[in-house]
Amino acid sequence: MDPKDYEDYQKNNVKASKSQLKEYIQIYADMAKKLKSESAVELEAVKNNIKKTYPNEIYFTLIDELERPVKLTLTESSKEYIIPVFTDIREYAVGSAKISKLFLDKLEMKVVTPEDIAKMAEEDEDFQGFVINPHSQNFNMDRNGSF
């Protein structure tokens, strides 16, 4: 979500704003289905738009009572994990409701920036990346911002 849209949301509870990243991910998904190959040249422009847009938005994630982010482990025996992030208030509302059912803790929303995510990657070797809008788009980026 654009930071200005988030300020509007906090002031006026306006929930109509859209994330450019969310739209680019949808374009990417639609094109990938049609092209059947993620290495197709046509996707490069969309991938570049995703990479350019990601640092310009803010995201929402879930934290527990100790202010730790919700971690989705990659395997049962591994400590490696990803965190879910949401591009806007609507995505957060749907995704948080579904994720909250999996955890016994009381979960709350936290705003995170790309810098916050980069800091997690630097500080915790078990952090492997994040999944954007896991219940609608399910788009994965690794700890370096690649997909």
Image (cartoon, grey):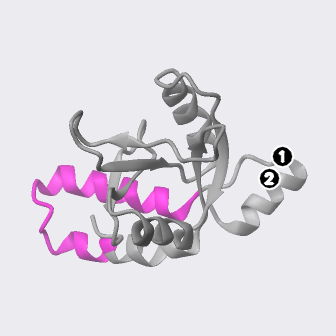
Q: Amino acid at mark 2?
A: Tyr
The residue labelled by disc 2 is 9
Above-or-below relation of 8 to 13? below
Which secondary structure class fits the magenta region best? helix
* Residue 132 in sight in this render: no
Q: Residues within 10 Å of mark 1 (few under 14, many from 20)?
A: few
Residue at point 46%, 23% (across, down): 102
Q: Are marks 2 and 1 in contact (CB under 8 Å)?
A: yes
* Residue 38 is inside the magenta segment: yes
143 on left or right of 3: left
* Residue 99 is inside the magenta segment: no
Q: Position of residue 15 (x, y in %)?
A: 73, 46
Q: Position of residue 141 (x, y in %)?
A: 33, 61
15 on left or right of 77: right
The residue labelled by disc 1 is 13
Above-or-below relation of 22 to 47? above
Image quarter where the C terminus lies is: bottom left
Above-or-below relation of 132 to 45? above
Q: Amino acid at mark 1?
A: Asn
Q: Give SS at disc 1.
A: loop
Q: Which residues are magenta?
A: 19-47
Name which quarter of the figure residue 52 lies in: bottom left
Name which quarter of the figure residue 123 lies in: bottom left
Name which quarter of the figure residue 97 lies in: top right
Q: Give SS at disc 2.
A: helix
Front position in the image: 15 or 66: 66
Residue at point 58%, 68% (across, down): 57
